[in-house]
Image (tube, rainbow, N blue to C red):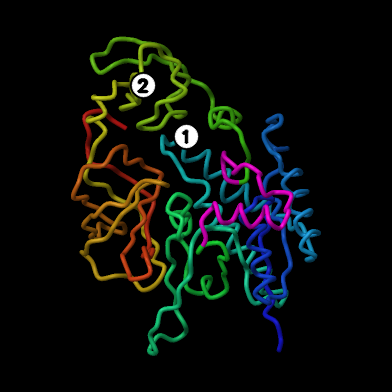
C-alpha cells in the first residue's frame, strides 16, 4: 500500500509537534517544514524575534520523531502581505488581524502550492480546527466543512475563514479533535523538547514584541491629550494610531481602570471612560468588506452566529448584502466591534460549529464618540 505524503508545518511549538507524531502514527509519509517568515532584521527591533530558537526546536522535534526536516523561506512574501498590511491598517486607524492575513496569503497558499509541486498529497498544521467531509453524493468534487476545534478555549477557526474548498481538500488538522491538555500530556509522554513550552504570544510569526514598539518602527509618534467624556485632560497619548477601541492597558493613567471609547482625529484627542461608560462602545450593526465564503455563497438575508474578534463568544445576527459587503445586525449589543478585525459567520451542525465565511469589518454603526 502506497502511503500518502504529507508535509507538516512545524513551527517550534507543541501543537505542530504532536501533529507530526499523530500523522506518522496514522501511517502517513511525513516530512517537516519550518517556515522562515520573519527574522526581525528589517525593522531594527532588538530581541523581538526568536525565529532561530523556534527553528531549532522544530528541528529537534523532527530528529526525535525521525522525519526529514527543511526550512523554507517566505520572508519576502510575509513582509508584502502581512507586515506592510499591518502598518497600513494601523495608519488608517484600524486594528488588523495579522494571523488571518498570514493564513490567507502566506502560510496556507504558499506552503500548499510548493508542497503540491513536490508531489505531496497533504499539508498539515497544528491549528485547533477540524475538517469534515460533507456527505452529499451530488457534491462534485468532494467538499468539506471547516469546524471549530473540540477545545473551545483554543479553537482557531476564526483565523481560517478565508480557506477555500480546493485548499481544504489538501489540508489536515491532526490536533483539532484534542484538547490542549491532551496535546501537552501526549508531548510529555513522547518526551518532546517542546512538551512544556509556553504558547507563543505576539504578532503571528513576528514574535513576542509589544504592538507599540513594533508600530513605532514605521509610524511616527504624534502625542496629544487623553481626555474623559467631559473633556477633562487626564494624560498624554503617543499617537491615535497606536490605540484600539475598548483597550485598557498601556494608557499610563491613574485612578482607573480606564477604557478607550473613541478618538477625535481633528483635535488629536484620545477619549477614555470608566467601566460603566463602556456602554458608549456598545453597538448592534457593522458593515464588512467583500466577504469570503468557504463553500457556496449562502442565500441572504439569513441568520448566522457571528464572532467579531478572536476568542469572543458567538452571537446571533441577521446578515444581508450591503453593496459588495455584508450588513450584520446583532440581536444583542456587542462591545467594541472594531474596524480591521473580521466578522466570521458560523452555523451549527451536529458535529459542532461550522465556518460559513466572513469579512473584514469596515464600519460600525455610529456611536457616541468617533472611531
Q: Position of residue 95 (x, y in %)?
A: 43, 39
Relative to the observer, which residue lies in front, 237 or 61?
Answer: 61
Q: Toward which corner of the image does residue 340 lie, by quadrant?
A: top left
Disc 1 from disc 2: Cα separation: 15 Å
Residue found at x 53% / y 38%: 87
Residue found at x 41% / y 68%: 294
Is the residue 38 above or below the residue 318 in the image? above
Relative to the observer, which residue lies in front, 334 or 113?
Answer: 334
Relative to the observer, which residue lies in front, 104 or 289?
Answer: 104
Dot label at residue 270: 2
**How many numbered discs sit on the rendered protein?**
2
Look at the numbered disc 2 and give the secondary structure of its residue: strand
Dot label at residue 70: none
302 lies left or right of 128: left
Q: Position of residue 303 (x, y in %)?
A: 22, 61
Is the residue 41 above or below the residue 182 in the image? above
340 lies left or right of 183: left
1 or 2: mark nearer the eye: 2
Q: Toward which corner of the image does residue 144 lie, by quadrant?
A: bottom left
Q: Are marks 1 and 2 in contact (CB under 8 Å)?
A: no
201 lies left or right of 144: right
Q: Position of residue 347 (x, y in %)?
A: 31, 64
Q: Position of residue 370 (x, y in %)?
A: 28, 30
Mark 1, Cα crowd under 10 Å, few <14 / some 14-19 / many 20+, is some
Relative to the observer, which residue lies in front, 4 or 140?
Answer: 4
Range of magenta residues: 178-204
Residue 202 sits inside the magenta stretch = yes
Residue found at x 58% / y 62%: 108
Q: Toward which corner of the image does residue 364 lie, by quadrant?
A: top left
Identify the residue position indicated by label 1 in the image. Answer: 91
- The N terminus: image quadrant: bottom right
Amino acid at each position: 500500500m502506497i502511503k500518502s505524503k504529507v508535509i507538516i508545518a512545524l513551527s517550534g511549538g507543541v501543537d505542530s509537534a504532536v501533529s507530526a507524531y499523530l500523522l506518522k502514527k496514522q501511517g502517513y509519509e511525513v516530512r517537516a517544514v519550518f517556515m522562515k517568515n520573519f527574522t526581525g532584521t528589517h525593522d531594527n527591533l532588538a530581541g523581538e524575534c526568536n525565529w532561530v530558537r523556534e527553528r531549532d526546536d522544530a528541528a529537534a522535534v523532527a530528529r526525535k520523531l525521525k522525519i526529514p526536516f527543511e526550512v523554507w523561506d517566505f520572508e519576502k512574501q510575509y513582509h508584502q502581505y502581512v507586515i506592510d498590511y499591518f502598518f497600513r491598517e494601523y495608519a488608517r486607524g484600524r486594528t488588523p488581524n495579522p494571523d488571518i492575513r498570514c493564513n490567507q496569503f502566506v502560510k496556507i497558499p504558499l506552503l500548499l502550492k510548493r508542497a503540491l509541486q513536490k508531489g505531496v498529497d497533504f499539508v498539515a498544521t497544528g491549528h485547533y480546527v477540524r475538517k469534515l467531509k460533507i456527505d452529499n453524493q451530488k457534491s462534485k468534487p468532494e467538499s468539506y466543512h471547516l469546524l471549530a476545534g473540540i477545545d473551545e478555549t483554543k479553537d482557531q477557526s476564526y483565523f481560517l475563514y478565508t480557506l477555500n474548498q480546493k485548499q481544504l481538500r489538501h489540508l489536515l488538522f491532526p490536533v483539532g479533535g484534542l484538547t490542549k491538555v491532551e496535546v501537552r500530556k501526549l508531548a510529555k509522554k513522547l518526551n518532546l523538547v517542546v512538551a512544556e513550552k509556553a504558547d507563543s504570544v505576539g504578532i503571528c510569526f513576528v514574535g513576542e514584541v509589544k504592538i507599540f514598539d513594533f508600530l513605532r518602527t514605521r509610524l511616527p509618534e504624534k502625542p496629544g491629550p487623553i481626555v474623559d467624556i467631559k473633556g477633562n485632560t487626564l494624560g498624554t497619548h503617543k499617537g491615535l494610531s497606536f490605540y484600539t477601541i475598548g483597550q485598557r492597558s498601556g494608557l499610563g493613567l491613574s485612578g482607573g481602570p480606564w477604557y478607550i471609547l473613541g478618538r477625535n482625529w481633528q483635535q488629536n484627542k484620545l477619549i477614555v471612560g470608566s467601566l460603566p461608560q463602556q456602554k458608549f462602545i456598545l453597538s448592534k450593526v457593522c458593515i464588512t468588506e467583500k466577504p469570503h465564503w468557504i463553500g457556496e455563497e449562502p442565500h441572504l438575508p439569513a441568520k448566522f452566529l457571528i464572532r467579531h474578534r478572536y476568542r469572543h463568544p458567538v452571537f446571533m445576527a441577521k446578515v444581508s448584502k450591503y453593496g459588495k459587503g455584508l450588513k450584520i445586525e446583532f440581536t444583542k449589543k456587542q462591545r467594541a466591534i472594531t474596524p480591521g478585525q473580521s466578522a466570521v459567520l458560523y452555523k451549527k451542525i451536529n458535529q459542532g460549529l461550522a465556518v460559513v465565511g466572513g469579512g473584514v469589518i469596515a464600519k460600525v454603526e455610529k456611536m457616541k464618540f468617533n472611531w
